[in-house]
């Protein structure tokens, strides 16, 4: 499996775990609590595979973290009724821009 496909799987697993953390209501609901543990476990497994494939840890972590933050914020706004204002959107754009710059800088 390609490194970036594994990275996408790590991001999806982390986002699933984080959203389930919200849904677990402080680990008082069994199924979402199990999904949290499985999601984070899978995320770190896939991250380990990505790093073993040779991608730089700084770039991998930046992409994983930024994509996770952006996706969780969007899911929170769209599906969980959480507020997302213009300042928060600007912050997400800056985080994603920073990751793009890290990626571009790594190619030279």
Image (tube, rainbow, N blue to C red):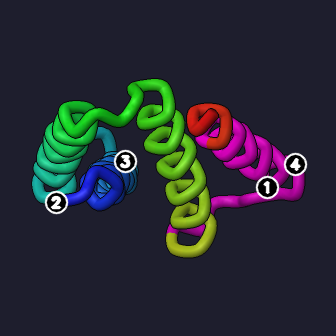
- Residue 34: % across, % down: 11, 49
Task: Tell which of 75 and 12 is nearer to you.
Answer: 12
Q: Nearer the viewer, mark 2 or mark 3?
A: 2
Mark 1: secondary structure: helix
Residue at the image point whose x is 12% and y is 58% from the top: 31
| Cα distance between the residues tagged 4 and 2 | 38 Å
Q: Main secondary structure of the magenta part?
A: helix
Residue at the image point whose x is 66% and y is 42% from the top: 104
Where does the magenta region start and end? 80-103
**Label ID, residue 74:** none
Is residue 50 magenta-colored? no
For residue 55, what is the image quadrant? top left
Residue identifier under label 4? 87
Give the residue pinned by disc 1. 89
**How packed is label 2: few (under 14 Cα within 10 Å), some, or many (20 or more)?**
few
Crowd around label 4: few <14 · some 14–19 · many ≥20 (10 Å): few
């Amino acid at each position: 499996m390609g490194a970036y496909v594994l990275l996408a799987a790590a991001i999806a697993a982390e986002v699933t775990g984080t959203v389930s953390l919200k849904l677990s209501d402080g680990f008082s609901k069994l199924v979402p609590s199990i999904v949290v543990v499985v999601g984070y476990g899978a995320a770190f497994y896939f991250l380990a595979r990505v790093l073993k494939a040779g991608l730089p840890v700084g770039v991998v972590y930046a992409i994983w973290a930024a994509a996770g933050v952006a996706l969780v914020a969007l899911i929170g706004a769209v599906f969980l009724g959480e507020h997302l204002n213009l300042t928060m959107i600007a912050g997400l754009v800056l985080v994603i821009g920073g990751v793009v710059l890290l990626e571009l800088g790594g190619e030279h």
